[in-house]
Amino acid sequence: MIQRRTVAADTPARVATSARVGCSGADSAGSLVVDAAISGSLKSQGVNHSEPIHAPHERPASQPLHEPSRPGRKPGLSAGKTVHLRPTAALAGRALLPGDPGRALALAQFLLEQPLMFNHHRGLWGYTGRAADGELLTVQSTGMGGPSAAIVLHELVTLGVTRAIRVGTCGALDRALALGDLIVAREAIAADGTSAALGAGALTRADPALAGTLAEQGERHLLSGERACRVGRIVSTDLFYESDADRNASWSAEGAIAVEMEASALFAVGAAFDIQVACVLAVSDTFDGPDVRTRIDDDALVTAAETMGMVAASALAIVG
């Protein structure tokens, strides 16, 4: 299936993106038409990004959004003022946070009716549309690593997000985990620099209510028994290619069942702003030794990502 998108303003970043996914040439002055081949579960129709459509009763993104008052709120940007996110559509009060921009697009197509691009600035693709419960949901990529993730969530909170779930991938430290299994992170060992810079201690924690609902929804969506859903401690680090072979063993001894790069920073930002943040991960890598990594295949990763998305969206629908 081919989805046709009109993207306003011929910026270098947009030209690069269009060239990568296939550009059909100028549709009109100052715009590009992007023809992206989309597989299978696409629900959304073509979107004209040069004329953002705002949901009923939603404030246009170009108007200031009033920052919600919350206990313990830490000072940051002025209400509605963001540097890295430049909204082009409405923002929901709840968000899914994949790291990969491509996964953000795929989840938006899979989960949302008529998704509109919320952000494309800095390649951090984000989309807003109506989820299965009829309410707006934003899917916003964070990029890789704690620093980028912390910036994105900080700015989403500034714009009005109050609940967020990281939907990402991880490497299994527990040998009982298999590729495609899901993990709901109860807490994270803060082995990354961003969590430390945010003042976090040795452990950062997910919101208990949201994490508990995630676990319930994970079990419900995986009743077939083909994959498992585990709840436990993970570890967040700054390195994907870890050169210290003993570090995984050390984290495992501390109770971590998986390793990834963003959750701890997101938990720390959530705690600082007093909002609900949780995390569900799909196992994309297993380790059979210091230098032996097994990677999930592309089709299995798509299936796992779609399951993660359904689990997370269901949890957000329940925890209001």
Image (spheres, rainbow, N blue to C red):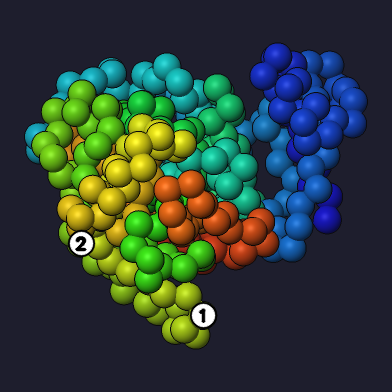
| Badge 2 or badge 1: first in the primary sequence | 2
Considering the image in quadrants, where does the N terminus appear? Answer: bottom right
Residue type beneath disc 1:
Glu
Which residue is depicted at the point 70% across and 15% down? 11
Q: Is residue 215 above or below residue 239?
A: below
Which residue is depicted at the point 27% across and 28% down? 194
Identify which residue, 138 or 263, lies in the foreground.
263
Query: Of helix, strand and loop, which one carries label 1?
Result: loop
Residue 226 — which label?
A: 1
Residue 209 — which label?
A: 2
Q: Is residue 57 visible from the viewing direction of this image? A: no
Please give left or right for residue 274 compared with residue 66 in the image: left
Q: Is residue 51 visible from the viewing direction of this image? A: yes
Where does the image place residue 132, in percent across and percent down from the top left? 51, 65
Query: Of helix, strand and loop, which one carries label 2?
Result: helix
Q: Are marks 2 and 1 in contact (CB under 8 Å)?
A: no
Considering the image in quadrants, where does the C terminus appear? Answer: bottom left
The single residue placed furthest to the bottom in the displayed view is: 224
Residue type beneath disc 2:
Ala
Where does the image place residue 38, in percent across and percent down from the top left? 76, 52
Where does the image place residue 306, in percent across and percent down from the top left? 56, 62
Which residue is depicted at the point 46% across and 51% down? 169
Residue 158 — which label?
A: none
Q: Residues within 10 Å of mark 2 (few under 14, many from 20)?
A: some
